[in-house]
Structures are given as C-alpha cells and as structure tokens.
Image: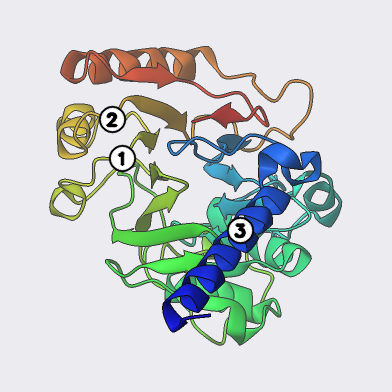
Amino acid sequence: MSVRAMFTSLATTLALSLIACAQATSPSSSPASAPSSPAPSPGAVAPVTLTYLGVAGWQVTEGEHALLVDPYFSRVRPKEEGAPVAPDEATIARYAPAHADGILVGHSHFDHVLDVPSIAKRTGAAVLGSESALNVARASGVSEQRLLLARGGETFALGPFSVRPVRALHGVWGGEKPGQIPRNVELPLTSAGYALGDVFQYLVRVAGRTVFIVGSPNFIESEIEGLRPDVAIVAGPSDKVPDYACRLMRALGKPPLVLANHFDNHAEPLGPKQMDVESERRADLAGFEREIHACAPQTKFVVPAHFRPISI
C-alpha cells in the first residue's frame, strides 16, 4: 500500500469513529442526557422581600439569606421613670429569624439598638454601625470579629448583600440625647442612657435590586444625591426639616416605591393589635403621602403591615 493510500485509510477510520462517538453521546439519542428542568432565562433574578418588623425595624430576605435593620422586638415600657431597660428574650426568640447575615444599626437610641446584641448572638449576624452601637454589642458579649465599624461611604459584603453606610442626621424632635456611648459602658442603661452616637442610613444592593433605608426623618442631601434606589424605606414626615419629602425624592431620583418607616406605637407589644396607629399618626402618614406625590407623582407609597413580606 502506498503512503498516500495508508493516510487516506487512517483518515476515513478516524472520521467514522468520531461520528459513532458523537451519536453515542448526543442528547437526542439518549434520554438520560436530557436536562431535567429548563435553563433559567438570562434575565431571571432571585426573589427579594422586605418585611416590616415594627418601629424602624426591617428584614431584607434573598433566598436563605437575611439582613436585619434596626430590629427591635422588645418594645419595652419601663415600670417606673428612670428604670433600666433590657431586651425581652422571650419576644426576641419568637420573632427573630433563625439566621441572619448582618444587622445594620442606624443610630444608638434604645429603640434601634437595645435588641441588637441578643439577636446577633442568636442568629450569628455581624453588626454594622457606629462606635456607640458597637460598644453596646461589646458590652453584651458579641465577639469582636463580628463587629463592623461604619464610617460612611465604604462598602461591606454581608452574605449576598452589598451594604454602603451613608452619613446622616437624626430627626428633629427635641429631647433626644446626643453624644456617644463609651466603650466601657455598663449595662443595663435607662432608655435615656442610650445616646444617639453617629447616624447612618444604608444603601443595600442584592440580586439586582437597590434599597435605601432612612430610619429617622432627616438626611444630608449631598450624601444621598444620585443614589437612585428602586425602593426607599423612609421615616417621616417631618415638619421641622424644610421641604423634607420633596428634597428627599429629588435627591433619590424619585424612586418607584416608597415604604413608610418608624410610624407605629413602639410601646405597644407586638400582637393582634400591632397595626393600631393613632388617628393623628394616620393623618400624618396621609399627609406625607400627599407631599411625596406632589413631587413624585409616579411613586407608589405603601404603609406596610407588620411581618407581611413585600416582594420587590
């Protein structure tokens, strides 16, 4: 056989072998190789929910992951003026999730931070907040490795959540205690003993959605200009901050959805009557909605119900 004939024969044999191999592994010839479920569409995104926990508390959930913001379930009512306040562990056990990736603390007043250490230890969550908020967590036995100091402008990864603290201001109500909670603080404190500390709002990104969380009705306009969230969770209204609603909506780019925040009676225990809101407060919320729609007519305004997830 000539060399040319030999190479022709080898090439033919190799081609036939490759065809046979392809037929043996082709999905059309083997039912076992067919996909068990259709592939997700390129634009598919994971479900994300926002759940109001009462006072300024929220839970952001993506799949098996949870991020908590200012969780406060105890809703304490001191038995006497000036008495120390402490977390209600039974109530926390009832309402806190089994696991959380992180807890964001807006400021260190008692209705924002009192329950945070107990919830962090129960859920394994990291705690992100001011030095004052972290000092409360330290004094309660939360490990240093799970304490994250917010300064404003940086980004933290907490599970699937990307979190950016934004420097902010507290609402103007009068009577709030300014100052810091020291590192060597001894607990328990009275409710008035929980000093404000530094104030933060938070921009949270997860699964293609962006949520901006305002826990007290005030803000620093230059810090939030251009954020453009899909959802704004907003404490309000405020008649002591000039043009509060309109300035906020303009700075945030008129987000499609606004959820009311920090509006319920935080001394009323969670339970069947948890959505009882005083008529004066309901009028305030209705007025707040009108103010927002005056500047952002296309924005949807929702007063959330406790523990009812809102899909975004």
Which type of secondary structure does the marked residue at label 2 adopt? loop
Residue 138 visible in the shown view? yes
Marks 3 and 1, how far apart at CA: 59 Å
Q: CA distance from mark 2 to mark 1?
A: 6 Å
- Residue at which label 1 appears: 229
- In the image, is 311 to the left or to the right of 227? right
Using the image, tell me which numbered label, if any, was put on residue 255. Answer: 2
Which secondary structure, mark 1? loop
Camera-near label (3 vs 1) is 3
Q: Residue at x 13, y 53 (%)?
A: 222
> Which residue is located at x 42 percent, y 62 percent?
196
- Does residue 48 lie above or below 145 as drawn? above
State the residue in front, 203 or 282: 203
Residue placed under numbered mark 3 in the picture: 16
Location of residue 162 by image quarter: bottom left
Residues at marks 2 and 1 touching, judged by CB atoms closer than 8 Å: yes
Q: Amino acid at mark 1?
A: Pro
Of the residues shown, which amino acid type is indicated by label 3? Leu
Q: Which mark is residue 173?
A: none
Q: Amino acid at mark 2?
A: Pro
Farthest residue, direction right? 90
Residue 248 point in image, percent of width and height = 21, 36
